[in-house]
Every structure is written in C-alpha cells, then in structure tokens.
Amino acid sequence: MAPLLSCEFNIDTACVELKFSDGNMISIDCTAVEDEVAKNMHQRSELDYLVYNDPVGYADLILNGDPEEYLRNVTDYTL
C-alpha cells in the first residue's frame, strides 16, 4: 500500500478520509460504523472520541482491528 498522505475527519460527510500518495482514497462512514458495532451510548462516545482526537487510530481500528473487541475492553458499562 502506498504511504498515507493525510487522514482527517470530514464533518460535512461524517467520514474519516484517508488519502494515499498513489492517489487512492478511503472514506469510512462513521455513522454506519457506529450503527453496526456500537451497542450503547458509551461505545458510541468512545468511537466519537477516536474520530475527533485520533482519526488515524480510528481508521486503523476499523480497517485492521476488531472494533467490537476494542469497545468491550475500553467501555465499562453494564446494565
């Protein structure tokens, strides 16, 4: 894969956008990800925190990691 040039959250589209040196671009729809993997508001908040504060970490988690496992480990919520 080509080197990453930029990674940022686009508030207009609610997507994290990754741009690579070969001209390719990946756009991650954050709303769709939250709808799919977040089970409660605490998990949604954790994903939102990553989007705004560490978009590269968010993209890595979604593309290469296990977001459901991550959310189980970092959120301390029980019914």
Image (cartoon, rainbow, N blue to C red):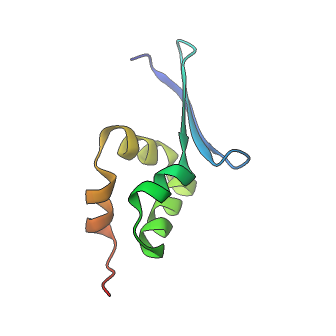
Q: Residue at x 48, y 74 (%)?
A: 41
Query: In which quadrant is the C terminus drawn?
Result: bottom left
Image x and y of residue 28, in percent:
52, 40
Assign the N terminus to one quadrant of the image.
top left
Identify the residue shown where x is 26% and y is 66%: 73
Residue at the right extreme of this rendering:
12
Above or below, 78 against 21 in this view is: below
Query: Is 40 located above or below residue 59 in the figure?
Result: below
Q: Is residue 43 above or below residue 52?
A: below
Residue placed furthest toward the bottom: 79
Q: Residue at x 47, y 51 (%)?
A: 33
Residue 24: quadrant of the picture:
top right
- The image shows residue 64, relative to residue 77, as above or below, that is above
For the point 44% across and 16% down, which residue is it? 2
Question: Looking at the picture, how far across and down is residue 17, in whole percent?
Answer: 58, 36
Residue 56 image position (x, y, % from top left): 47, 42
